[in-house]
């Protein structure tokens, strides 16, 4: 007789909880599943596995509720992360504006750093893709590492000056919520 795959059964009822069992949130998923199954607060994964083998209708409903609660908790964590990122970006831009309004030369620092990153990025593009040259293994590895770092920097420069899609979406969502409250 094949072994009972309790995780597959759990995945059929509460997919996000089952998926979380294989990752860094496994402890939280086991705790929520154990609570939904009516097990003690200190229940282990083995206890959940045994309980899943004989699910009742009420336990299935409780697991689906735990699944929904877990999804809400994960969405709240993502929202808090996005809000922190947006606040950090707005803070950096606000500081630049305040320094520029005060006439400080430091206000040019983001412009200069952005310019250096863009210059380095395009210089690497030219070196890698335009010039035909034999690079030693060490030179090629170093140039590739530099290019990888500059690609990340290029993305950050674009996000700083043009805004990020996540930040733009969050701003758009906030404006929509305010408009809905004002209309309602």
Image (cartoon, grey):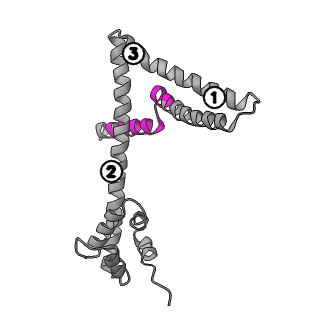
- Who's the residue at 58% across and 25% down the image? 120
163 lies above or below 9: above
- In the figure, is residue 151 to the left or right of 92? right
Foreground: disc 1 or disc 2: 1
Classify 10 Å Cα crowding around label 3: few (below 14), some (14-19), many (20 and above).
some
Q: CA distance from mark 2 to mark 3?
A: 35 Å
**Residue 169 placement (x, y as % from top left):** 43, 39
Residue marked by disc 1: 124
Tell me, yes or no, whether the highlighted magenta stretch contains residue 152: no
Q: CA distance from mark 1 to mark 2?
A: 40 Å
Q: Answer yes or no: do the residues labelled 3 and 1 have beta carbons within 8 Å?
A: no
Magenta portion: prevailing SS class: helix
Bounds of the magenta segment: 157-178
Magenta-colored stretch includes residue 167: yes
Q: Is residue 167 above or below residue 130?
A: below
- Which dot, 3 or 1, sits closer to the camera? 1
- Foreground mark, 2 or 3? 3
């Amino acid at each position: 007789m094949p072994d009972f795959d309790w995780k597959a059964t759990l995945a059929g009822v509460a997919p996000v909880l089952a998926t979380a069992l294989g990752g860094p949130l496994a402890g939280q998923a086991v705790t929520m599943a154990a609570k939904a199954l009516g097990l003690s607060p200190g229940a282990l994964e083995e206890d959940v596995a045994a309980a899943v083998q004989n699910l009742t209708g009420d336990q299935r409903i409780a697991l689906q509720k735990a699944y929904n609660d877990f999804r809400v908790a994960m969405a709240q964590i993502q929202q808090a992360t996005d809000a922190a990122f947006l606040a950090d970006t707005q803070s950096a831009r606000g500081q630049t504006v305040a320094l520029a309004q005060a006439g400080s030369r430091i206000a040019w620092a983001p412009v200069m750093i952005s310019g250096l990153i863009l210059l380095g990025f395009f210089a690497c593009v030219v070196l890698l893709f335009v010039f035909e040259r034999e690079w030693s293994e060490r030179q090629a590895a170093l140039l590739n590492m530099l290019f990888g770092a500059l690609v990340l920097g290029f993305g950050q420069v674009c996000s700083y000056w043009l805004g990020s899609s996540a930040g733009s979406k969050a701003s758009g969502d906030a404006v929509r919520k305010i408009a809905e409250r004002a209309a309602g």
